[in-house]
Amino acid sequence: MRILLNIIWLIFGGLWLALGYFAAGLICCILIITIPFGIASFRIGIYALWPFGKTTVDKPTAGTMSLIGNVIWILVAGIWLALGHIATALAMAITIIGIPLAVANLKMIPISLMPLGKEIVPVDARPSYM
């Protein structure tokens, strides 16, 4: 079922969302100081291509620098990427088949706003304390 949902996701919005993340990543990699933002954007872009079967968890080593970086990210790219997820979720929620895809889009909004300090893992590899 995950493969079918991922294929439908890819066709009806995942590719465009991933391209948005990749564009943000390229822009962030222009300056040396923003390369961590670019790497995070590429990581989430790959997640946006094939999201079913994966989840996000907090990194235990994330600290104050991740928080500061996330505030900068929200102002620079996070708002625009989150709005892309909202728009895509609204478009997908029009049909009954698209409702699970819309829910997945809404679940991706927190990581699009605050990607630093998060890790994308397979659902089966999620820590037991979650």
Image (cartoon, rainbow, N blue to C red):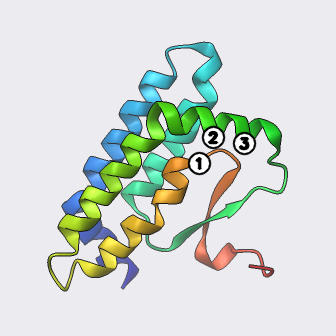
Quadrant that contains the C terminus: bottom right
Left/right of residue 14 with respect to residue 59 in the rendered view: left
| Count of numbered badges drawn on the protein | 3
Identify the residue at horizontal 83%, vertical 57% (top origin).
60
Q: Is residue 37 left or right of residue 16?
A: right
Mark 1 and mark 2 in contact? Answer it, CB < 8 Å: yes
| Residue highlighted by disc 2 | 70
Q: CA distance from mark 2 to mark 3?
A: 5 Å
Residue wearing tag 1: 114
**Is the Cβ of the residue at disc 2 closer than 8 Å to that at disc 3?**
yes
Label 1 sits on what residue type?
Met
Q: Secondary structure at mark 3?
A: helix
Instruction: Check disc 3 and report the residue beneath it.
Output: 67
Q: Dot 2 surroundings within 10 Å: few (below 14), some, or many (20 or more)?
A: many
N-term-proximal mark, 1 vs 3: 3
In the rendered image, residue 12, in percent from the top left (x then y), is placed at 20, 62
Q: Quadrant of residue 102?
A: bottom left
Q: What is the x, y in percent for residue 111?
A: 54, 55
Residue at image x 50%, y 74%?
53
Q: Earlier in the sequence, mark 1 or mark 2?
A: 2
Residue 15 lies, with reference to residue 30, above or below; the image says: below
